[in-house]
């Protein structure tokens, strides 16, 4: 691939353009919003405006409902030899391609499984897709050149290609992406009229649950409309579990021994199923998440403090599986939780304390499944 065009310079489109440009591909940036395209160009994502000659691949970074019409229009202009899109649903764009009279031979659907809670070109990052899955959904009409060009783009972006049927993809992302966004929004909406003093009690758990609720409402309205049936099916299952949970909690609030016992059983079942489901989420590089323990370190809120902590951890030769940062409101410090292999947690905590870091003291690390317990500072 020597040349490409990106139609739509939001977060995903600009990130693709940055990744391809970094690998030496000549990228042309096209957007009805010229300000967004200029911003992307100023970031080094490519050249502003349509190319003079046909490019190898055009990436249509537009809403799902517009993929078909945009594809037909760009094919008439001879923009590229092959085309792909990045919409987060795949069945509707496939239907739209045929309805718009576009040529399906030069088109292959695509969906990079990466994103951020912020939108727009300024949120873009050239490394956004590295190590992430990138779904490709060829149809029986998709030509070999379109498939090969899409595979090359995925490789240049550092992602991992996954070939799926469009319907299977849409049902999968309803569970792993679209419904979680709705649930995050529902939880965040409960905070809308919460008193300020109560909001100040919010910790990392609430931030984790509501983080993705900050997405662009217009974009997410398009996504949910395009995958409405699959999302509604998952929400129906969730509603049934919620009703059972409400019944269990009401039972626990009574003096009736039978209802309390049933409530305890129902809650234990729900929480157990939650753990089982979470354990199925792959860790780094798609491997199972190893048994980990947290090492919690208090750091000051000064520039470079986090980098200094990570450098200290690197000197110890301990691999960090995950990390979270929790800032206390009104406090000029933060609590960094480093998740490391269970067998290395205690020694790492001791060595960090010896190096002058303020580490929360840890209780004894039991063999799995017993978790480590922080007992004070």
Image (cartoon, rainbow, N blue to C red):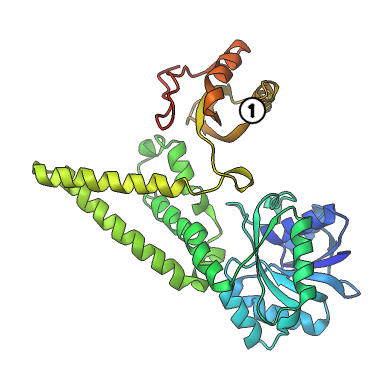
Position above or below: 350 against 325: above
Q: Nearer the viewer, residue 283 or 30?
A: 283
**Could you tell me which residue is drawn at 57 percent across and 52 percent down?**
117
Question: Left or right of 363: which side holds 212?
Answer: right
Question: Left or right of 80: which side holds 232?
Answer: left
Report which quarter residue 340 is drawn in: top right
**Could you tell me which residue is drawn at 48 percent across and 28 percent down?**
330
Q: Nearer the viewer, residue 368 or 54?
A: 368
Give percent across and percent down for residue 47: 86, 62
The quadrant the C terminus occupies is: top left
**Disc 1 crowd, CA 10 A, few/some/many (<14, 14-19, 20+):** some
Counting labels gives: 1
Q: Is residue 10 visible?
A: no
Give percent across and percent down for residue 311: 69, 25
Give the labeled residue for mark 1. 306
Q: Nearer the viewer, residue 347 or 93?
A: 347
Position above or below: 127 against 312: below
Position above or below: 33 against 14: below
Give percent across and percent down for residue 118: 60, 52
Q: Is residue 228 visible?
A: yes
Question: Left or right of 4: which side holds 278?
Answer: left
């Amino acid at each position: 691939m020597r040349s490409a065009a990106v139609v739509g310079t939001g977060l995903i489109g600009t990130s693709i353009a940055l990744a391809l440009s970094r690998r030496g591909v000549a990228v042309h940036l096209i957007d009805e919003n010229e300000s967004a395209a200029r911003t992307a160009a100023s970031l080094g994502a490519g050249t502003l405006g349509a190319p003079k000659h046909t490019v190898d691949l055009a990436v249509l970074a537009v809403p799902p409902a517009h993929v078909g019409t945009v594809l037909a229009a760009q094919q008439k202009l001879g923009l590229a030899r092959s085309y792909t899109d990045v919409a987060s649903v795949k069945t509707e764009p496939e239907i739209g391609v045929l309805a718009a009279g576009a040529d399906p031979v030069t088109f292959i659907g695509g969906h990079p499984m990466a994103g951020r809670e912020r939108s727009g070109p300024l949120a873009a990052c050239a490394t956004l897709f590295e190590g992430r899955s990138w779904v490709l959904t060829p149809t029986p009409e998709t030509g070999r050149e379109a498939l090969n060009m899409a595979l090359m783009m995925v490789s240049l972006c550092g992602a991992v290609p996954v070939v799926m049927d469009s319907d299977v993809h849409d049902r999968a992302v309803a569970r792993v992406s679209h419904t979680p966004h709705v649930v995050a929004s529902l939880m965040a909406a409960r905070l809308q009229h919460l008193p300020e003093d109560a909001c100040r009690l919010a910790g990392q758990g609430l931030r984790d649950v509501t983080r993705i609720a900050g997405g662009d409402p217009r974009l997410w309205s398009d996504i949910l409309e395009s995958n409405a049936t699959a999302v509604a099916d998952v929400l129906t299952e969730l509603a049934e579990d919620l009703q059972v949970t409400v019944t269990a909690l009401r039972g626990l609030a009574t003096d009736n021994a039978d209802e309390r016992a049933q409530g305890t059983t129902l809650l234990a079942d729900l929480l157990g199923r939650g753990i089982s489901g979470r354990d199925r989420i792959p860790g780094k590089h798609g491997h199972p998440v190893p048994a980990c323990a947290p090492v919690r370190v208090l750091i000051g809120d000064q520039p470079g403090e986090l980098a200094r902590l990570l450098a200290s951890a690197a000197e110890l030769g301990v691999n960090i599986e995950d990390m979270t940062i929790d800032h206390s409101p009104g406090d000029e410090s933060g609590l960094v939780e480093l998740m490391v292999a269970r067998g290395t947690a205690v020694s790492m905590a001791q060595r960090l304390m010896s190096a002058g870091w303020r580490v929360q003291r840890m209780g004894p690390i039991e063999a799995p499944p017993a978790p480590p317990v922080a007992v004070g500072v």
